[in-house]
Image (cartoon, rainbow, N blue to C red):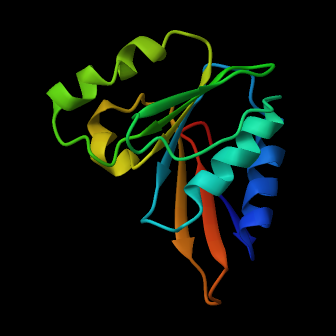
Amino acid sequence: MKEYRTYSPEETEALGETLAAGLRGGEVLACFGGMGMGKTAFARGLARGLGSDDAVSSPTFALVHEYRGKIPLYHFDMFRVSSWEDLYSTGFFDYLDTGAVLLIEWSENIEDALPKDAIRIRFSRGEEENQRVIQVSSLEE
């Protein structure tokens, strides 16, 4: 597991952009952490790092947003998903075979459905008000 500390939303975005450089497509990034922890800021940087110029926002009501770049990014928000039926209605399982990067906010709600090789990213508040502790792990480590 690697641990990063950021001190602003801009630094969290920059971290997402940096980590995007190591992605090849087909990865599932499972984000864990409460509201306001920086998941959407991270998504903005990740999209930029994957070559997208699209405006990135939380897909809370749409459930999934698509961003086109060198590698497509599908950005899910599973906050309102509380059952397998809800999860199937998002089309989540269909996206797994697209070769795109999948970024999933609120992965806590679908943990049993995550692929075994999903990269888990935990966001938490640090000691300072705008500090975020971001832990990135995968089963390959």
- Residue 131 in percent (x, y) is at 67, 79
- Relative to 81, is 134 on the left or the right? right
The front one of 7 and 65 is 65
Q: Residue at x 30, y 40 (%)?
A: 110
In which quadrant is the N terminus drawn? bottom right
Q: Is residue 124 above or below residue 99?
A: below
The front one of 115 and 94 is 94
- Relative to 102, is 81 on the left or the right? left
- Residue 120 in percent (x, y) is at 52, 47
Q: Is residue 99 above or below residue 109?
A: above
Q: Residue at x 80, y 38 (%)?
A: 48
- Residue 104 in percent (x, y) is at 48, 39
In which quadrant is the C terminus drawn? top right
Q: Is residue 20 above or below residue 128?
A: above
- Relative to 31, is 68 on the left or the right? right
- Relative to 79, is 8 on the left or the right? right
Q: Residue at x 74, y 73 (%)?
A: 8
The answer to whether residue 50 is visible is yes
- Residue 75 in percent (x, y) is at 54, 34
Q: Residue at x 78, y 29 (%)?
A: 52
The answer to whether residue 1 is visible is no
The front one of 57 and 81 is 57
